[in-house]
Image (cartoon, helix red, strand yellow):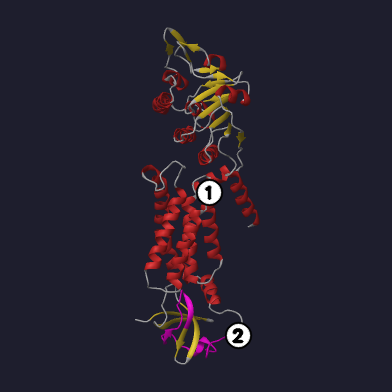
């Protein structure tokens, strides 16, 4: 627990390190993947929240997952802060697409950009039909990204398609037959009064800032390893939610707070922690969730049947779970709409379907297990002196079929009165309200199993 708290504190400190007027530098190194996307998204949200002057991607990558690259493209297009890519030293494949999604590109003296043909796992060539489909789709995608930022779309197409040739005015920049890769010198070459792709060559980041006219203090962030953890936690969010829901259900059946309650707490904590470090939500959703759970528990245990607290609690819990999965940027409206809600509702839908399958199975089979009955009965027999007015010395003094009245809520264990005697009982899993008639179903050693009397 102490280690987890330290991780939380570290994350909090990382999210408050940019100030107005600064230039935020985000390194994009190594393979492009979902974890790298989470890191870049975190940086963009930091820059937006603190009104930084510019975002600079310090890039050195040979590429990676196109799906992660397209996520970065959407995130970069969504920000109003000026974006710059510094190709230091490579912007290959998916890196070229990300660079095209920024407003300006600067190149290191020895650097290259391009060669974005899609490949399979391990760098293997895709089957010809799949290759044609992927190239056809991403050719148009590359062109669209380039056009949005004012780059030559033919250059972008030649990055991914061997069948594209590039001609600017009367100058042939690239002949079809191979993928286009531009060196720094080729990228800044001016043809018809406009550079082929890049704005200028910069010897290093300070030189880039000078040439870009950025005078603010430079703040560089680094990936922490939390992004990889965030990827797995957000990917597994439906299962974490399912574990939390099942833990709460079992705990309510047993009563008190034990292993099932601990499991539920861990699952929900991991779910919200994953959303936090993925840059999806703050801790306000945890407060909303805790308030909702408190209302639900009070409905079940303190004033059952009042309905309103339970319904309000369910609404707050559902809203907090959806809110925690919404990819919300500072410039977005407070109330999420449209595509922002697709993934949260999908994850929540998967969880609900799995819960509808799992809960009836648990209700049917778990109460019949000796472990469940032993735990539940132990909860109803706390250590210390008994305050019962009279107890049955042995279950043998009761007979199967004997009728009595529940004195406490049975969920599934509690106390019941049989004549002048008060005994500890347990149900097969059903909840029985106080003052309800019960009858003895079975006597199993020290356990008296009851059910609601008809």
Label 1 crowd bin: few (<14), some (14–19), many (20+), radius 10 Å: many
Q: Nearer the viewer, mark 2 or mark 1?
A: 1
Quadrant containing the N terminus in the rendered view: bottom right
SS class, disc 2? loop
Name the residue beneath numbered marker 1.
276
* Residue 422: x %, y % from top left: 49, 87
Q: Does the magenta stretch include residue 388?
A: yes
- Residue at 56% in and 17% down: 184
- Residue at 55% in and 58% down: 266
Q: Main secondary structure of the magenta part?
A: loop
* Residue 61: x %, y % from top left: 57, 28
* Residue 249: x %, y % from top left: 46, 65
Is residue 446 at least partly visible in the picture?
Answer: yes
Q: Are marks 2 and 1 in contact (CB under 8 Å)?
A: no
Quadrant containing the C terminus in the rendered view: bottom left
> Between 223 and 30, which is closer to the camera in this rendering?
223
Judge whether 347 appears above or below 398 on screen.
above
Magenta residues span 386-415
Name the residue beneath numbered marker 2.
385
**In this rendering, would 131 be left or right of 260?**
left
Judge whether 426 appears above or below 6 on screen.
below
Is residue 88 at least partly visible in the picture?
Answer: no
> Between 145 and 370, which is closer to the camera in this rendering?
145
How far apart in space, not on screen, are marks 2 and 1 (Cα)?
Answer: 47 Å
Judge whether 4 appears above or below 152 on screen.
below
Residue 228 tag number: none
SS class, disc 1? helix
């Amino acid at each position: 627990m102490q280690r987890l708290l330290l991780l939380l504190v570290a994350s909090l400190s990382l999210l408050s390190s940019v100030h107005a007027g600064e230039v935020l530098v985000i390194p994009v190194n190594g393979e492009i993947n979902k974890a790298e996307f989470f890191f870049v998204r975190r940086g963009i949200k930091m820059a937006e929240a603190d009104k930084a002057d510019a975002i600079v991607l310090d890039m050195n990558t040979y590429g990676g997952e196109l799906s992660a690259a397209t996520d970065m493209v959407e995130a970069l297009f969504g920000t109003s802060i000026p974006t710059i890519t510094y190709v230091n030293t490579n912007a290959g494949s998916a890196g070229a697409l990300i660079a095209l999604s920024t407003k300006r590109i600067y190149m290191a003296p020895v650097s290259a950009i391009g060669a974005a043909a899609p490949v399979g796992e391990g760098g293997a060539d895709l089957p010809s039909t799949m290759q044609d489909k992927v190239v056809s789709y991403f050719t148009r995608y590359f062109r669209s990204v380039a056009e949005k930022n004012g780059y030559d779309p033919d250059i972008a197409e030649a990055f991914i398609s061997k069948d594209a040739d590039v001609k600017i005015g009367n100058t042939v920049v690239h002949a079809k037959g191979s993928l286009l890769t531009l060196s720094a010198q080729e990228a800044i070459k001016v043809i018809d009064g406009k550079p082929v792709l890049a704005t200028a060559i910069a010897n290093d980041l300070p030189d880039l800032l000078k040439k870009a006219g950025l005078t603010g203090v430079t703040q560089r962030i680094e990936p922490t390893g939390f992004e990889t953890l965030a990827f797995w936690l957000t990917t597994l969010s439906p299962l974490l939610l399912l574990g939390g829901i099942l833990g709460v259900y079992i705990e309510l059946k047993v009563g008190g707070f034990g292993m099932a309650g601990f499991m539920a707490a861990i699952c929900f904590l991991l779910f919200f922690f994953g959303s936090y470090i993925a840059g999806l939500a703050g801790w306000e959703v945890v407060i909303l969730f805790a308030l909702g759970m408190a209302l639900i528990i009070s409905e079940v245990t303190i004033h059952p049947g009042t309905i309103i607290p339970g319904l309000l609690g369910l609404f707050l819990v559902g809203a907090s779970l959806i809110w925690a999965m919404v990819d919300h940027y500072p410039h977005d409206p407070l109330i999420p709409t449209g595509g922002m809600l697709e993934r949260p509702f999908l994850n929540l839908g998967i969880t609900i379907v799995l819960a509808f399958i799992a809960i009836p199975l648990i209700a049917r089979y778990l109460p019949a297990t000796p472990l469940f009955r032993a735990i539940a009965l132990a909860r109803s027999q706390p250590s210390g002196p008994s305050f019962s007015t009279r107890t049955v010395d042995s279950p043998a003094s009761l007979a199967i079929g004997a009728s009595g009245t529940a004195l406490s809520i049975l969920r599934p264990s509690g106390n019941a009165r049989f004549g002048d005697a008060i005994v500890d009982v347990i149900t097969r899993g059903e909840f029985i309200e106080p003052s309800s008639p019960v009858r003895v179903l079975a006597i199993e050693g020290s356990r008296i199993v009851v059910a609601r009397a008809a």
